[in-house]
């Protein structure tokens, strides 16, 4: 199974930490070919920081290759901000989005596919 993680590495941000631990877990699973696409930083002041994880973990993360050209992965996981709901070449796409107020504002998204207005999450009463 081909899995692509699109997000940040080597950054002390919650999404980056989540992404890195997901990568480390997937690296330990047989039958998964893991690739990583480094997403642009959401803030130009952010800089990669080494030493957040153990050296052997960071070496394993750094060794994850970019996906080869033309790859149509089985799964694409987007762990970045702004949220990107645009179509992907993957069979399945997972977008991790934080809905702290029960919705994701359109201004937090890259894709117009969310219709330009806030949407309630499935657990929201309205």
Image (cartoon, rainbow, N blue to C red):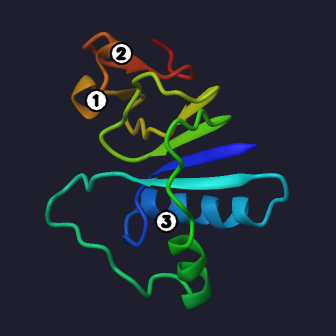
Residue ranking furthest to the left: 45
Q: Mark 3 highlights which residue?
A: 17
Label 2 neighbourhood size at 10 Å, few (<14), some (14-19), many (20+)? some
Query: In the rendered image of this protein, does residue 118 appear above or below residue 19?
Result: above
Between label 2 and label 1, give the one nearer the viewer. 1
Label 1 neighbourhood size at 10 Å, few (<14), some (14-19), many (20+)? some
Q: Mark 1 highlights which residue?
A: 110
Query: In the rendered image of this protein, does residue 7 appear above or below residue 120?
Result: below
Residue shown at 45% from the left, 82% from the top: 52
Between label 3 and label 1, give the one nearer the viewer. 1
Residue 6 in percent (x, y) is at 46, 48
Between 118 and 50, the residue placed more toward the observer is 50
Do the residues under discs 3 and 1 have CB atoms within 8 angstroms?
Answer: no
Residue 11 in percent (x, y) is at 37, 70
Q: Mark 2 highlights which residue?
A: 114
Residue 117 in percent (x, y) is at 27, 14
Q: Quadrant of the N terminus?
A: top right
Residue shown at 81% from the left, 60% from the top: 29
């Amino acid at each position: 199974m081909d899995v692509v993680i699109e997000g940040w590495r080597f950054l002390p941000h919650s999404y980056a930490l989540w992404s890195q631990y997901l990568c480390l877990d997937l690296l330990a699973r047989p039958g998964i070919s893991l690739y990583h696409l480094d997403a642009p930083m959401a803030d130009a002041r952010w800089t990669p920081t080494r030493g957040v994880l153990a050296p052997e973990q960071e070496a394993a993360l750094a060794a994850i290759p970019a996906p080869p050209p033309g790859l149509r992965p089985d799964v694409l996981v987007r762990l970045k901000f702004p949220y990107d709901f645009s179509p992907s070449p993957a069979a399945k796409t997972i977008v991790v989005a934080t809905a702290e107020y029960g919705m994701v504002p359109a201004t937090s998204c890259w894709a117009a596919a969310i219709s330009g207005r806030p949407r309630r999450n499935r657990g929201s009463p309205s």
